[in-house]
Amino acid sequence: MKNLRHPTALIHPGAKLADDVAVGAYSIIGEHVEIGAGSVVGPHVVIGGHTTIGKGNRFFQFSSIGEIPQDKKYRGEPTRLVIGDNNTIRESCTLNLGTVQGGGVTFVGNGNWIMAYVHLAHDCRIGNHNVIANSVQFAGHVTVGNHTLIGGMSGIHQFVRVGDFAMLGFQTRLSQDLPPFVTAVGNPAEAKGPHQEGPRRAGYSAPRLDMIKKMYRILYRAGSSFAAAQQEIAALRGEVADADADLDNMLDFLGHASRGIVR
């Protein structure tokens, strides 16, 4: 389907593009790039490196995808960027390859909405169905779960984790882990309450939403130590059958909070 590819686009003959991938004017696609069916690469987009892109993605103009990491330790190793399906990546985003020291892969899952000027550094791992607003800056090795909302112009420190259904407010500086279902805002970030709108839109029942409130109160309002709060959250198992997965999600996250959590 040559008519889908502008004549000024430069596509390396070694690149593997599904037949229906559209490529806009003046875009450049490198030798080791693979792009799945139904994806659209807008004008003036550069996709390089060992980059694998799934189906139904859309890249807007001036984005740089699969460029080498901004890490002085990088020595040209064939590290990778892997992007799943049905992601929207808006204007002027930069998504870098991984590093050997960080596992070699930067990863983006499925169904993410990534707005303009977002920087995703080496070895980050972004889950599914996240909304990442304009000018969010991810340092290296950041992990983001699923269904999060990350406010514009926020900065996230290297190795920080963001849990499922967490929400980060506008212009927030996040230097510690943000647990699931928690809203944080500020510089530095402070916990401001449970995030329930996302779970509500995802179809959470009223008892399940109430359990999110209980977890938040135990973690932030009851005055318990970190260890005691984990025990109290664990003791809630069985109260609401469909909330046990949320309790386990929270406990697993807290159990791996090596940087500490937002307080």
Image: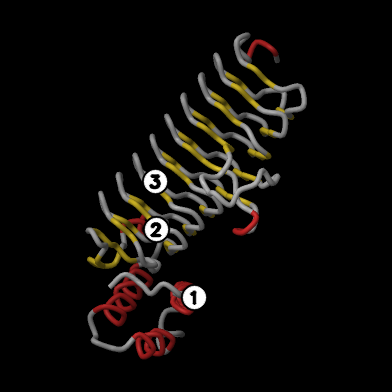
User: Where, quadrant-wise, is the C terminus in this rendering?
Assistant: bottom left
- Secondary structure beneath dot 1 equals loop
Q: Residues within 10 Å of mark 2 (few under 14, many from 20)?
A: some
166 sits left or right of 169 in the view: right
User: Toward which corner of the image does residue 203 lie, by quadrant?
Assistant: bottom left
Measure the alpha-carbon separation of dots 2 and 3: 15 Å
- Secondary structure beneath dot 3 equals strand
Q: Disc 3 designates what residue? A: 132
Q: Residues within 10 Å of mark 1 (few under 14, many from 20)?
A: few
Q: Residue at x 50, y 73 (%)?
A: 245
The x, y position of residue 98, in whole percent, is 60, 49
The x, y position of residue 161, in whole percent, is 44, 63
- Secondary structure beneath dot 2 equals loop
Q: Nearer the viewer, residue 75 or 213?
A: 75
Q: In terms of sequence position, does the residue under pointer 3 or pointer 1 come before the other?
A: 3
Q: Residue at x 47, y 35 (%)?
A: 89
Measure the alpha-carbon separation of dots 1 and 2: 17 Å
* Residue 197's disc number: none
195 sits left or right of 125 in the view: left
The x, y position of residue 50, in whole percent, is 68, 39
Q: Disc 2 designates what residue? A: 157
Name above or below for residue 177 compared with residue 28. below
114 sits left or right of 42 in the view: left
* Residue 256's disc number: 1
